[in-house]
Amino acid sequence: MGTETDRGRRYELRHVDDRNADLEDLDSHADPTETRDAVRFTDDGEYRPLATAATLPTGWVLSDLDASDLLRAVEFVYPASIANWYREEQGELDVTHFRETAARQTGIYADVGDLGRDALDYAVEACCVDEQCCARREWDATADDEIDVPRGDGAFPCREPCSMFVAAVREFRDIEERADGADEENESDETGAANDLEGYRARYRSAKRCGGET
């Protein structure tokens, strides 16, 4: 939200679900750097390893920002979002597709590119739709191989597979390689990123089941 004052236009940044909340009912911040702490955990107290996850907490506000401070604050909430949006508007967004990203991986992630083509669609459905991520996916399997999953309705683009997606793909490869259908109870139940991966695994299996029925 923006307001004209005698010091020029001033801005306020808050979660869209708090747009009608009274200012005194929100946790108020003045320094844009404080935004990092305000959005680090979900409303349920879980750590958010992915900044663009659809779990942005409510209940905070930054007030009396000038344009420069507003841009800084948004960058803390959604890193690189404004820069990528601007590049896209100028027709200059550089997109890195999955196979290219996978080819750069080393160590325990070196084999993520071995994920099968159908499995890649299931992976994107598990991780990248609006219900999971508020960025709009602009990458595909390759420049000539489009992934048949909705890209999302986010205002800013996702120009390449993120590190959380790559980590999830490693988990999905393990699922595909289990010939004996090992029990899911053996999988990690740790907090933070491990919890996110556990949710990805469940959604991947659901996407695979639904894909197999069509």
Image (spheres, rainbow, N blue to C red):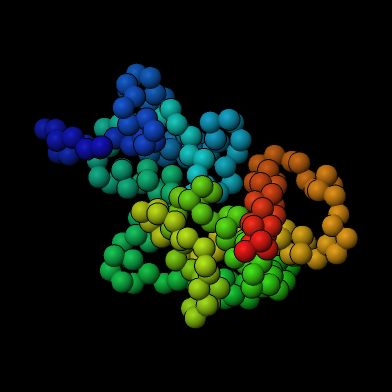
Residue drawn 74% across and 41% down? 190
Q: Please, which residue is most extreme toward the front here?
A: 214
Q: Position of residue 179 (x, y in %)?
A: 85, 64
Taking the image as shown, residue 168 lies to the left or right of residue 147, namely right
Q: Is residue 44 left or right of residue 138?
A: right
Position of residue 93 measured from the top left corner of the image (x, y, whole percent): 37, 69
Residue 163's quadrant in the figure?
bottom right
Query: Where is residue 109 drawn, in percent x and y?
Result: 70, 66
What number of labels is visible?
0
Q: Is residue 108 above or below residue 72?
A: below
Quadrant (top left/top right/bottom left/bottom right) for the C terminus: bottom right
Closer to the camera in the image, 57 or 82: 57
Residue 17 seen from this side: yes
- The answer to whether residue 204 of the structure is visible from this angle is no
User: Is 100 drawn above or below residue 152 in the view shown?
Assistant: below
- Answer above or below: position of 54 versus 135: above
Q: Position of residue 136 (x, y in %)?
A: 43, 58
Asked if 75 appears above or below 23 in the picture, the reply is below
Q: Residue at the spot x=76%, y=64% of the render? A: 176
Screen quadrant of the N terminus: top left
At x 32%, y 48%, the residue is 71
